[in-house]
Image (cartoon, rainbow, N blue to C red):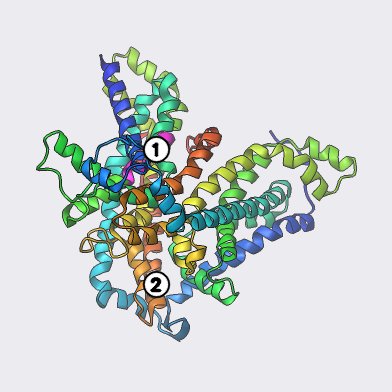
Amino acid sequence: MTRRRTAALPTPVALLFLLPAATLFAVFVLYPMATALTYSLFSWRGTAQDAFVGLDNFVTLLTTEPYRSQLPRAFAHNALLFAGAMVVQNSVGLLLAYALHKRERLRRLFQVLYTMPYLVSPLVVGYLWSLLLSPLFGPVNAVLRAVGLESVAQPWLGDPDTALWVVVLVTAWQWVGFPLLVYGAALGSLDPTMEEAAMLDGATSRQRFWHVTLPMLLPVIGTVSVLTFIFSMEAFPIPYALGGSNGSPAGATDVMSLLFYRTAFGSGASNAIGVSSAVAIVLFVVIVGVSVLFTRWFRRVERRLT
Amino acid sequence: MRRVGVNVVLSGYAVVALVPLLIMVWNSFRTDQELVAEPLGLPVSPSFDAYREAWVEASFSTYFLNSVLVTTASVALSTAVSLLAAYALARSRSRLMGVIEQVFVSGLMMPVFLMIVPIFYLLDTIGLASTRTGLILVYSAVSIPFSVFVLATFLRQLPDELEDAARIDGAGPLRTFWSVLLPLVRPAVATVVVFRFVPIWNDFFYPLILVRDRDLYTLPVGLTTFFGEYQTSWSTLFAGLVIATLPLVLLFLVATRQIVAGLTAGMGR
């Protein structure tokens, strides 16, 4: 439809309409973003900018304790959160969406039920599960005892070996509605004749899922994966609620955002601004870099398959 | 048979999704003694002590008021300025506008950790450190990309004959915007309002860093100090979580349609 737009606004008037939003955006988003890039290249004495030090703050991150050991550890934990989210949350979301796809009457009801945890504040979700998993009065351990799994019951959040998995599962519990709704919408927009044709050819329902439906969902799977990666790298409220700002127990739930928070606002170090800005930039570069590379790789895979 | 199996799985997951939330609600009506004695019990004789404790002694009334003020003001301000901007972007043919729109939309993936330290010092410099006003301005600004994007997309789909008619009748751009477009754009405004209300209400990162004064804490930051101080008063903790969640449940009941539609907007291809 190429209709001539007659109602075009004259540019000066349009600029006037833009002014309030543009001012707010420039002052509180663009300006901070631009200065943040320079913050990491200076040394700081408290809030006073000191000398230009080039990449020294980044060198500090890689060579000085506690950053030297905490940075890779936090990164590894973020990577695990991502892997866990892909395996638990996104595959459960996809399977539930696929199961719901064929149940038109119940779909809406179940979608709403599954999405409820998604609307609750992630901080509330974290604190709620810290209470549910309490060794003293936690219903989770009580259920395990009630069904005779006494030996499995344990202080889930007190044990460094299980704490990070609790973060993964609690995050998945809250977020499963996201892949569910996205995949649900994607399934709804697929051409049903493909599956019907496969069915006529005698394909079993499992074959139809793996060889017909799944390949058609690939572009959406790519989008969900990238978004999951970004969310996993920026995870903050749930780890904070479950393990505090130090990533208790013993740093087992420490992630990049907590490391950044401690460095910037909790360390009391005089060069807190310089080093914490370096942490934020490393995180930003990883997020953007991996997302771009992944998207590119994924498009190639997609093209090969279709 | 197979169908039954799938239904069992679907219902089973509904239990997993809902029971923790139900436990949160009913444990808030039980005393600490009941919680320890019977972790899986129901509120047989409901007690509201936990709510009184949380609301009065643990200053949840203050946090709640702050959250309401900050969230509504931020959503109102960001929606208003975004609507004006979206109108300009959707109805202008200038190339400059295209560039400005790109800049706005690039903010959809904002690196919050990168921005927070400069924002902290910016607010300090302009005398808005640790104020509700500062928080409102920041929330409004970071809401602009999403709101402008949704509203401009919607405005582009509206036919412009009505605006033409208004212009021919002698209405200026502001009058046209106010009397002709505003009534038409309501569904998109509803989506934007709901979709900015939820994350701002739930946000914990900005106030944790930008607000130092306890009397100005919003609910999520209030919760963090509260969880430190009331560690052993479990039913009060449950009550606090319910108070922080209740407004969203109400919003959800009112606006389920917008929420489900908006969550999947532009994702399905």
> Is residue A219 among the parts visible in the rendering?
no
Name the residue at 38% across, 40% down: B25
The amino acid at mark 2 is Phe
Whole-percent x, y for residue A113 in the image: 40, 32
Quarter of the image for residue A53 reads bottom left
Furthest residue in direction left, as rendered: A151
The residue singled out by tag 2 in the image is A265
| Chain designation of label 1 | A
Whole-percent x, y for residue A103 in the image: 39, 20
- In magenta, the rendered stretch is A171-183
The residue singled out by tag 1 in the image is A177
Quarter of the image for residue B123 reads bottom right
User: Height in image: B250 above or below A39?
Assistant: above
Whole-percent x, y for residue A23 in the image: 66, 64
Q: Are marks 2 and 1 in contact (CB under 8 Å)?
A: no
| Chain designation of label 2 | A
Quarter containing the C terminus of chain A: top left
Task: Say whether disc 2 or disc 1 marks the residue closer to the N-terminus.
Answer: 1
